Structure formats: structure tokens, C-alpha cells
Amino acid sequence: MGVRTWIGSWPVYRQFTGDDPLGRGAAAKSAGSERIKARVSTADKVVKSVCPYCAVGCGQDVYVQDGRVTQIEGDPDSPVSRGRLCPKGSASLQLTTGSAREYRVLYRRPHGTEWEPLDLDTAMDMIADRVIAARRQGWQQEEDGVPVRRTLGLASLGGATLDNEENYLIKKLFTALGAVQIENQARI
């Protein structure tokens, strides 16, 4: 390699002699950086999501390749976090792909000490039966001669990971069931 070629390979030289005086584009690139590919460049699609951990509700970009989550990063379009994630949110890929993740419903009977697997249909039926029983048991038709038609046996507390549409549907569901204690902890 000649001296001229060697000096021409210096980013500072290319910055001062080329069309990139601030050194933010072509002048800053090297042969090594040309070969580097972004770890998300092979993703088939990007799905917008919300971090599942705390009540802040930071936006996330979930990168999917061949039907599998390959990377989760902060969403720069999020007005809440502007692309930033805390250490817990940054590690949320492990939540979806970690070896400790359960892919089945586990149930522990009252006074039981062991968890047992249940199929999803059985678990959903158990939840529905318990909601109906709690509604029936806590139902108030009237109080002090005033019709109230409500139940105090059900309540809902949502979190910041719920979006407006989910909160709307939860409010509709619990209102239709007659619940009056419906709250969301999100304050953003």
C-alpha cells in the first residue's frame, strides 16, 4: 500500500478533503465498519409494544424473524421513553425467550403445595365460573331503598402497560358486570 493510499484511508483526511466535513457519514466509514451489519437488519418485521415491567409504559420495538422474537429495543417514537429503556426493560428479550419461561397454565389447588398443569380451556372455564360466582355473591340490587344494581365482589386495577383501547374494553366489561371499583394506576 502506497503512502497516498494509506493517508487516504484515514477518516480525518477523508473528512477534510471530501464532502463530509463533520465526519458523520462516508468520512467516518472504514472497511471494517462497511462489513458490520446491524443485529436487527435481518428481522422480518418490527412490532410496536410496551414494556411489561413497571407503570411507566416505555415503548419497545420488538424485532421478529421467522416467527421468533430476536431483539427488543427502545422505541424512539415513544413519547414516554423516547427510545430509552431501563436495565430491566432492556433485558425483556429474556422474558420472551428465556429457558425459565412457562408455556402452559399452572394451578395450585387451595391448601396445595404443588403446582399442576392445566389445559387453557379448563383454566378459562375456572376463571369464568369464579367471576360469575363472585358477581352473584356480591350483588346488590338496592341499598337503603335506592336501586343500585351493582356488585362489590369484583374490582379491576389496570396498569400502564395497557393501552387506551384495552382500558376501554376492560371498563366496558367490568361496568357490564356491575363492578364499581375500576381503576388504572397509569398517570402518564
Image: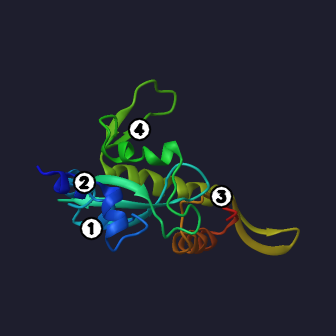
- SS state under label 4: strand
Q: Residue furthest top?
A: 113
The amino acid beneath tag 1 is Lys
Residue at label 1? 45
Q: Earlier in the sequence, mark 2 or mark 3?
A: 2
Q: Residue furthest right?
A: 144
Distance Cα–Cα, label 1 vs label 3: 37 Å
Nearer mark to the viewer, of 1 and 2: 2
- SS state under label 3: strand
Q: Earlier in the sequence, mark 1 or mark 3?
A: 1
The amino acid beneath tag 3 is Ala
Against 164, residue 137 (above or below) is: above
**Where residue 107 is drawn, which disc sits there?**
4
The structure residue drawn at horizontal position 50% and vertical position 43%, both measured from the top left corner, is 88
Residue 116 picture quarter? top left
Relative image position of residue 33 (x, y in whole percent): 25, 54
Residues at circles 1 and 3 in contact by the CB criterion of under 8 Å = no
Distance Cα–Cα, label 1 vs label 2: 41 Å
Residue at label 3? 155
Q: Residues within 10 Å of mark 1 (few under 14, many from 20)?
A: some
Q: Residues within 10 Å of mark 4 (few under 14, many from 20)?
A: some
Q: Nearer the viewer, residue 71 or 2?
A: 2
Residue 9 placement, left or right of 58? left
Identify the colour scheme used.
Answer: rainbow
If the image is split into quadrants, where does the C terminus sit? bottom right
Distance Cα–Cα, label 2 vs label 3: 71 Å
Relative image position of residue 93 (x, y in whole percent): 36, 47
Nearer mark to the viewer, of 1 and 3: 1
Relative image position of residue 161 (x, y in whole percent): 54, 59
The structure residue drawn at horizontal position 37% and vertical position 65%, both measured from the top left corner, is 16
Q: Earlier in the sequence, mark 4 or mark 2?
A: 2
Residues at circles 4 and 2 in contact by the CB criterion of under 8 Å = no
